[in-house]
Image (tube, rainbow, N blue to C red):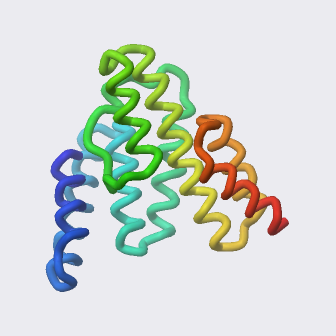
Amino acid sequence: SLFAALLGKWAELSSPPAKESTFSDAIAQAQRAGTLEPDYIMACCNLAYLHLAVQQVTTGERLLLRALRMLEAPAVRPEQLRGEHFPHSFSHFHLESERICGRFTPESTDWCDAMCSALRCRVGMNLAEIAYARKDFTTAVKLSQAAVLADPKVAKAFYVLANAYRAL
């Protein structure tokens, strides 16, 4: 999954002809990681976000829903959450994941719980935005509510929730 995330980052910086090819390679690497370890949550998330980066929204959404189900399962193991995140931007999630790594011993129970919450918020919020874009406002409300419950410090989750409620 690390190689897939790095290829995805490289693709974002590439010019258009190389960009498509590099994203394709990144997706292939993320699929391989998911095949080797089917319960590896970060591989599933990275694959989803790579598909979203190339406008394959249906596939990305399906994979994000799968990742959310895995994150909501009891007893998520730390090894399911470790690894590089794609895309790496200065979003709340990435800043929060850095804070979590600085605050808790990596792969401890507290670290795992905090990373699960941060990922549930990120994935739920992204799924809510996808539902909102296709005008499925009821689903957008439910997913936004779940994102807010996962991490109530994220103002964007409240914003997506407010927009979904307003659209109902």
Q: Decide which of 149, 70 is in the foreground and name it.
A: 149
Quarter of the image where one finds residue 79: top left
Q: Residue at 54% of width from left, 29% of height from top? A: 73
Count of all numbered marks drawn on residues in the image = 0
Q: Decide which of 80, 31 is in the foreground and name it.
A: 80
Left or right of 159, for residue 64: left
Q: Decide which of 166, 79 is in the foreground and name it.
A: 166
Left or right of 143, for residue 75: left
- Up-down: is 109 above or below 67? above
- Up-down: is 51 above or below 63? below
Q: Residue at 60% of width from left, 38% of height from top? A: 153
x and y percentages locating residue 33 in the rendered image: 24, 46
Q: Residue at 48% of width from left, 26% of height from top? A: 114
x and y percentages locating residue 48 in the rendered image: 40, 57
x and y percentages locating residue 150 in the rendered image: 61, 35
Quarter of the image where the C terminus is located: bottom right
x and y percentages locating residue 89 in the rendered image: 35, 55
Q: Residue at 59% of width from left, 36% of height from top? A: 151
